[in-house]
Image: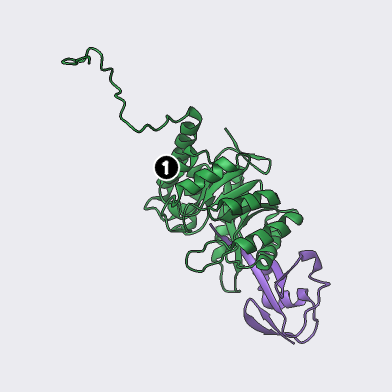
Chain colours: A green, B purple
Amino acid sequence: MALSIYGQELSSRLLIGSALYPSPEIMKNAILASGSQVITLSLKRQNPQAQAGQQIWQYIQEIVRETKGFLLPNTAGCKTAKEALTLAKMSREIFQTDWIKLEVIGDDYNLQPDPIELLNATEQLIADGFKVLPYCTDDLVLCQRLYDLGCQVIMPWASPIGTGKGLMNPYNLETIRLRLPNATLILDAGIGKPSDACIAMEMGYDGVLLNSAVALADDPVMMAQAFASALTAGEQGYLAGIMQQRQTAHPSTPTLDTPFWHQN
Amino acid sequence: MNLFINGQSLSLTDNNTLEHALNAFLTEQQQQLSFAVALNGDFVGKADYLTTDVSNGDSIDILFPIQGG
Protein backbone atom coordinates (compact mmCIF):
# COMPACT_ATOMS: atom_id res chain seq x y z
CA MET A 1 0.00 0.00 0.00
CA ALA A 2 1.21 3.46 -0.86
CA LEU A 3 2.03 6.20 1.61
CA SER A 4 0.16 9.42 0.99
CA ILE A 5 1.59 12.75 2.13
CA TYR A 6 -0.71 15.71 1.58
CA GLY A 7 -2.30 13.94 -1.35
CA GLN A 8 0.95 12.80 -2.95
CA GLU A 9 1.17 9.03 -3.31
CA LEU A 10 4.61 7.58 -2.61
CA SER A 11 5.93 4.13 -3.37
CA SER A 12 7.99 3.87 -0.18
CA ARG A 13 7.17 4.49 3.45
CA LEU A 14 10.73 5.53 4.17
CA LEU A 15 11.77 9.18 4.20
CA ILE A 16 15.50 9.65 4.32
CA GLY A 17 18.02 12.35 5.11
CA SER A 18 20.98 13.46 3.03
CA ALA A 19 23.46 14.30 5.80
CA LEU A 20 26.43 12.58 7.47
CA TYR A 21 27.33 10.14 4.71
CA PRO A 22 30.98 9.36 4.09
CA SER A 23 30.72 10.80 0.59
CA PRO A 24 28.14 12.21 -1.85
CA GLU A 25 28.47 9.04 -3.92
CA ILE A 26 27.65 6.82 -0.96
CA MET A 27 24.77 9.13 -0.07
CA LYS A 28 23.32 8.68 -3.54
CA ASN A 29 23.79 4.91 -3.59
CA ALA A 30 22.30 4.49 -0.13
CA ILE A 31 19.26 6.63 -0.86
CA LEU A 32 18.65 4.79 -4.12
CA ALA A 33 19.03 1.45 -2.30
CA SER A 34 16.50 2.53 0.31
CA GLY A 35 13.77 2.97 -2.27
CA SER A 36 12.77 6.23 -0.62
CA GLN A 37 11.10 8.92 -2.67
CA VAL A 38 11.40 11.71 -0.10
CA ILE A 39 14.75 13.26 0.72
CA THR A 40 15.29 15.83 3.42
CA LEU A 41 17.76 18.67 3.02
CA SER A 42 18.42 22.10 4.41
CA LEU A 43 19.71 25.61 3.80
CA LYS A 44 22.77 27.16 5.31
CA ARG A 45 25.13 30.06 4.82
CA GLN A 46 27.99 29.44 2.47
CA ASN A 47 30.84 31.90 2.21
CA PRO A 48 32.34 32.59 -1.22
CA GLN A 49 35.18 30.08 -0.81
CA ALA A 50 33.04 27.09 0.18
CA GLN A 51 31.86 24.76 -2.58
CA ALA A 52 31.04 21.46 -0.88
CA GLY A 53 27.34 22.12 -0.53
CA GLN A 54 26.89 22.52 -4.26
CA GLN A 55 28.15 19.03 -4.99
CA ILE A 56 25.70 17.55 -2.51
CA TRP A 57 22.87 19.58 -4.03
CA GLN A 58 23.70 18.29 -7.49
CA TYR A 59 23.67 14.70 -6.24
CA ILE A 60 20.34 15.26 -4.50
CA GLN A 61 18.84 16.63 -7.69
CA GLU A 62 20.07 13.53 -9.55
CA ILE A 63 18.46 11.30 -6.92
CA VAL A 64 15.15 13.13 -7.21
CA ARG A 65 15.21 12.69 -10.99
CA GLU A 66 16.05 8.98 -10.78
CA THR A 67 13.48 8.18 -8.08
CA LYS A 68 10.81 10.57 -9.41
CA GLY A 69 10.99 11.74 -5.84
CA PHE A 70 10.35 14.82 -3.73
CA LEU A 71 12.33 17.19 -1.60
CA LEU A 72 11.46 17.82 2.02
CA PRO A 73 13.35 20.89 3.26
CA ASN A 74 13.81 21.19 7.01
CA THR A 75 14.10 24.15 9.37
CA ALA A 76 16.99 22.65 11.31
CA GLY A 77 18.71 25.12 13.60
CA CYS A 78 15.64 27.27 14.16
CA LYS A 79 14.71 28.06 17.72
CA THR A 80 11.80 30.41 17.25
CA ALA A 81 8.68 30.45 15.13
CA LYS A 82 9.95 33.57 13.34
CA GLU A 83 13.22 31.88 12.37
CA ALA A 84 11.34 28.82 11.16
CA LEU A 85 8.94 30.94 9.13
CA THR A 86 11.77 32.81 7.41
CA LEU A 87 13.71 29.63 6.65
CA ALA A 88 10.58 27.92 5.35
CA LYS A 89 9.89 30.77 2.94
CA MET A 90 13.48 30.71 1.73
CA SER A 91 13.20 26.94 1.23
CA ARG A 92 9.99 27.29 -0.70
CA GLU A 93 11.58 29.73 -3.13
CA ILE A 94 14.64 27.57 -3.78
CA PHE A 95 13.13 24.10 -3.72
CA GLN A 96 9.76 24.99 -5.25
CA THR A 97 7.78 22.97 -2.73
CA ASP A 98 5.22 23.80 -0.08
CA TRP A 99 6.34 20.85 2.03
CA ILE A 100 8.32 21.77 5.10
CA LYS A 101 9.74 19.54 7.81
CA LEU A 102 9.24 21.87 10.73
CA GLU A 103 11.90 21.76 13.43
CA VAL A 104 11.85 24.37 16.16
CA ILE A 105 14.34 23.32 18.77
CA GLY A 106 14.01 24.03 22.47
CA ASP A 107 17.14 22.42 23.91
CA ASP A 108 20.67 22.43 22.55
CA TYR A 109 21.62 19.06 24.02
CA ASN A 110 18.75 16.75 23.21
CA LEU A 111 17.41 18.89 20.34
CA GLN A 112 13.86 18.32 21.44
CA PRO A 113 11.27 20.60 19.92
CA ASP A 114 9.98 23.66 21.72
CA PRO A 115 6.28 22.81 21.75
CA ILE A 116 5.06 26.40 22.10
CA GLU A 117 7.16 27.81 19.28
CA LEU A 118 6.35 24.71 17.23
CA LEU A 119 2.61 25.34 17.50
CA ASN A 120 3.07 29.05 16.72
CA ALA A 121 5.16 28.26 13.67
CA THR A 122 2.73 25.60 12.49
CA GLU A 123 -0.22 27.95 12.65
CA GLN A 124 1.59 30.67 10.70
CA LEU A 125 3.01 28.32 8.10
CA ILE A 126 -0.32 26.66 7.40
CA ALA A 127 -1.89 30.11 7.02
CA ASP A 128 0.82 30.88 4.44
CA GLY A 129 -0.02 27.78 2.41
CA PHE A 130 2.67 25.43 3.61
CA LYS A 131 2.14 21.69 4.00
CA VAL A 132 3.71 21.18 7.41
CA LEU A 133 5.35 17.97 8.62
CA PRO A 134 6.12 18.87 12.21
CA TYR A 135 8.84 17.09 14.15
CA CYS A 136 7.57 16.77 17.72
CA THR A 137 7.97 14.81 20.90
CA ASP A 138 5.83 11.75 21.72
CA ASP A 139 3.36 13.96 23.56
CA LEU A 140 -0.24 13.10 22.80
CA VAL A 141 -1.59 16.55 23.61
CA LEU A 142 0.98 18.26 21.42
CA CYS A 143 0.23 15.87 18.55
CA GLN A 144 -3.49 16.52 18.98
CA ARG A 145 -2.92 20.29 18.87
CA LEU A 146 -0.83 19.96 15.71
CA TYR A 147 -3.54 17.85 14.11
CA ASP A 148 -6.23 20.34 15.13
CA LEU A 149 -4.23 23.16 13.52
CA GLY A 150 -4.36 21.29 10.22
CA CYS A 151 -1.30 19.05 10.09
CA GLN A 152 -2.29 15.94 8.18
CA VAL A 153 1.16 14.52 8.86
CA ILE A 154 2.71 14.40 12.32
CA MET A 155 6.19 13.18 13.10
CA PRO A 156 6.81 12.23 16.72
CA TRP A 157 10.31 11.27 17.77
CA ALA A 158 11.43 7.80 18.73
CA SER A 159 14.27 9.34 20.75
CA PRO A 160 16.58 12.38 20.39
CA ILE A 161 18.01 13.09 16.97
CA GLY A 162 21.10 11.11 16.09
CA THR A 163 21.15 9.00 19.26
CA GLY A 164 20.14 5.72 17.64
CA LYS A 165 18.37 4.80 20.86
CA GLY A 166 15.25 3.55 19.12
CA LEU A 167 11.75 3.82 20.54
CA MET A 168 12.14 5.30 24.05
CA ASN A 169 8.47 5.19 24.89
CA PRO A 170 6.43 2.66 22.92
CA TYR A 171 3.40 3.27 25.12
CA ASN A 172 3.29 6.95 24.16
CA LEU A 173 3.75 6.16 20.50
CA GLU A 174 1.03 3.50 20.59
CA THR A 175 -1.29 5.94 22.35
CA ILE A 176 -0.72 8.59 19.71
CA ARG A 177 -1.53 6.03 17.00
CA LEU A 178 -4.69 4.93 18.77
CA ARG A 179 -5.96 8.42 19.52
CA LEU A 180 -5.16 10.00 16.13
CA PRO A 181 -6.38 7.31 13.75
CA ASN A 182 -6.78 9.69 10.83
CA ALA A 183 -3.38 11.35 11.05
CA THR A 184 -0.48 10.21 8.90
CA LEU A 185 2.11 9.34 11.53
CA ILE A 186 5.75 9.16 10.59
CA LEU A 187 8.25 8.18 13.26
CA ASP A 188 11.15 10.62 13.05
CA ALA A 189 14.48 10.84 14.92
CA GLY A 190 16.45 8.49 17.10
CA ILE A 191 16.02 5.41 14.98
CA GLY A 192 19.12 3.21 15.13
CA LYS A 193 18.43 -0.20 13.69
CA PRO A 194 16.04 -1.77 11.20
CA SER A 195 14.04 -3.45 13.97
CA ASP A 196 13.17 0.03 15.30
CA ALA A 197 11.51 0.82 12.00
CA CYS A 198 9.82 -2.56 11.93
CA ILE A 199 8.35 -2.01 15.40
CA ALA A 200 6.99 1.38 14.37
CA MET A 201 5.27 -0.14 11.36
CA GLU A 202 3.90 -3.01 13.46
CA MET A 203 2.27 -0.35 15.64
CA GLY A 204 0.48 0.96 12.60
CA TYR A 205 2.67 3.96 11.89
CA ASP A 206 2.51 5.13 8.30
CA GLY A 207 6.22 5.64 7.75
CA VAL A 208 9.62 6.33 9.18
CA LEU A 209 12.08 9.18 8.64
CA LEU A 210 15.72 8.56 9.41
CA ASN A 211 19.22 9.73 8.50
CA SER A 212 21.95 8.76 10.98
CA ALA A 213 20.89 5.12 11.14
CA VAL A 214 21.82 4.68 7.49
CA ALA A 215 24.51 7.32 7.02
CA LEU A 216 26.54 6.26 10.06
CA ALA A 217 26.28 2.53 9.48
CA ASP A 218 29.45 0.69 8.52
CA ASP A 219 27.82 -0.05 5.17
CA PRO A 220 25.19 2.62 4.46
CA VAL A 221 24.01 1.01 1.23
CA MET A 222 23.36 -2.37 2.87
CA MET A 223 21.76 -0.67 5.86
CA ALA A 224 19.45 1.26 3.55
CA GLN A 225 18.34 -2.02 2.01
CA ALA A 226 17.85 -3.48 5.48
CA PHE A 227 15.58 -0.61 6.44
CA ALA A 228 13.56 -1.02 3.28
CA SER A 229 13.03 -4.68 4.17
CA ALA A 230 12.22 -3.81 7.78
CA LEU A 231 9.51 -1.37 6.80
CA THR A 232 7.95 -3.95 4.49
CA ALA A 233 8.08 -6.60 7.23
CA GLY A 234 6.55 -4.30 9.80
CA GLU A 235 3.78 -3.14 7.51
CA GLN A 236 2.89 -6.67 6.51
CA GLY A 237 2.96 -7.75 10.13
CA TYR A 238 0.52 -5.00 11.01
CA LEU A 239 -1.81 -5.76 8.11
CA ALA A 240 -1.65 -9.51 8.75
CA GLY A 241 -2.97 -9.02 12.26
CA ILE A 242 -0.51 -9.74 15.07
CA MET A 243 -1.60 -12.39 17.55
CA GLN A 244 -2.81 -11.26 20.96
CA GLN A 245 -0.28 -11.58 23.74
CA ARG A 246 -1.28 -14.08 26.40
CA GLN A 247 -0.32 -14.25 30.04
CA THR A 248 0.19 -17.98 30.29
CA ALA A 249 1.81 -20.51 28.02
CA HIS A 250 -0.28 -22.26 25.40
CA PRO A 251 1.48 -25.25 23.84
CA SER A 252 1.78 -25.15 20.10
CA THR A 253 2.08 -28.91 19.77
CA PRO A 254 -1.24 -30.74 20.49
CA THR A 255 -1.07 -32.48 23.85
CA LEU A 256 -3.59 -35.21 22.97
CA ASP A 257 -1.90 -38.59 22.37
CA THR A 258 1.43 -37.30 23.61
CA PRO A 259 3.32 -40.31 24.97
CA PHE A 260 2.87 -40.65 28.78
CA TRP A 261 0.11 -37.99 28.69
CA HIS A 262 -2.46 -38.52 31.40
CA GLN A 263 -5.94 -37.08 31.34
CA ASN A 264 -7.03 -35.74 34.73
CA MET B 1 27.40 52.10 4.52
CA ASN B 2 28.39 48.96 6.44
CA LEU B 3 26.41 45.76 6.08
CA PHE B 4 26.77 42.30 7.54
CA ILE B 5 26.41 39.50 5.02
CA ASN B 6 26.56 35.95 6.36
CA GLY B 7 28.28 37.34 9.40
CA GLN B 8 30.94 39.16 7.43
CA SER B 9 31.27 42.92 7.24
CA LEU B 10 30.89 44.57 3.83
CA SER B 11 31.21 48.23 2.91
CA LEU B 12 29.03 49.62 0.15
CA THR B 13 29.58 53.08 -1.25
CA ASP B 14 27.05 53.62 -4.05
CA ASN B 15 23.79 51.93 -4.85
CA ASN B 16 21.91 50.85 -1.74
CA THR B 17 19.73 48.08 -3.11
CA LEU B 18 19.80 44.51 -1.91
CA GLU B 19 20.66 43.43 -5.46
CA HIS B 20 23.80 45.55 -5.37
CA ALA B 21 24.84 44.18 -2.00
CA LEU B 22 24.43 40.60 -3.23
CA ASN B 23 26.44 41.27 -6.36
CA ALA B 24 29.20 42.81 -4.25
CA PHE B 25 29.40 39.83 -1.91
CA LEU B 26 28.83 36.81 -4.11
CA THR B 27 31.33 35.52 -6.59
CA GLU B 28 30.24 35.36 -10.23
CA GLN B 29 29.93 31.61 -9.88
CA GLN B 30 27.76 31.84 -6.78
CA GLN B 31 25.45 34.31 -8.45
CA GLN B 32 24.49 31.53 -10.87
CA LEU B 33 23.60 29.10 -8.08
CA SER B 34 20.35 28.55 -6.21
CA PHE B 35 20.18 30.70 -3.11
CA ALA B 36 17.67 32.58 -1.00
CA VAL B 37 17.96 35.77 0.99
CA ALA B 38 16.75 37.18 4.29
CA LEU B 39 17.17 40.80 5.30
CA ASN B 40 17.24 41.43 9.04
CA GLY B 41 15.64 38.05 9.59
CA ASP B 42 12.84 38.53 7.06
CA PHE B 43 12.61 36.64 3.79
CA VAL B 44 12.99 38.71 0.62
CA GLY B 45 11.87 37.07 -2.59
CA LYS B 46 14.09 37.10 -5.67
CA ALA B 47 11.66 39.35 -7.50
CA ASP B 48 12.20 42.04 -4.87
CA TYR B 49 16.00 42.25 -4.77
CA LEU B 50 16.14 45.30 -7.06
CA THR B 51 13.42 47.20 -5.23
CA THR B 52 14.51 46.43 -1.67
CA ASP B 53 16.76 49.04 -0.09
CA VAL B 54 19.40 48.25 2.49
CA SER B 55 20.54 50.56 5.28
CA ASN B 56 23.65 50.97 7.37
CA GLY B 57 23.97 48.10 9.86
CA ASP B 58 21.57 45.77 8.04
CA SER B 59 22.17 42.03 8.30
CA ILE B 60 21.74 39.87 5.23
CA ASP B 61 21.67 36.08 5.19
CA ILE B 62 22.32 34.29 1.92
CA LEU B 63 21.53 30.59 2.19
CA PHE B 64 22.35 27.76 -0.19
CA PRO B 65 21.09 24.17 -0.33
CA ILE B 66 23.00 21.69 1.81
CA GLN B 67 22.51 18.22 3.14
CA GLY B 68 20.10 17.77 6.03
CA GLY B 69 18.29 15.13 8.08
Q: Position of residue B69 (x, y in %)?
A: 53, 57
- 10 Å crowding of disc 1: few (<14), some (14-19), many (20+): some
Mark 1 element type: helix
Q: Give the farthest residue toward the left.
A: A260
Q: Give the farthest residue toward the front.
A: A264
Q: Residue at x 78, y 79 (%)?
A: B54
Q: Position of residue A98 (x, y in %)?
A: 70, 52
Which residue corresponds to mark 1?
A: A226
| Residue A131 appears anywhere in the view | yes
Looking at the rendered structure, the number of numbered marks drawn on it comes to: 1
Given residues A252 and A153, the one toward you in this image is A252
Pick the quarter of the image with the N terminus of chain A: top right
Pick the quarter of the image with the C terminus of chain A: top left
Given residues B53 and A67, the one toward you in this image is B53
Q: Position of residue A114 (x, y in %)?
A: 58, 63
Q: Is residue A243 shown above or below A147? A: above
Q: Give the farthest residue toward the right.
A: B51
Q: Is residue A28 shown above or below A77? A: above
In this picture, residue A126 sits left or right of residue A210: right
- At label 1, which amino acid type do we have? Ala
Q: Position of residue B24 (x, y in %)?
A: 71, 78
Q: Is residue A92 shown above or below A256? A: below
| Residue A61 appears anywhere in the view | no
Q: Residue at x 45, y 35 (%)?
A: A233
In this picture, residue A216 sits left or right of residue B26: left
Given residues A27 and A103, the one toward you in this image is A103
Q: Give the farthest residue toward the top.
A: A257
In this picture, residue A127 sits left or right of residue A232: right
Chain at numbered mark 1: A
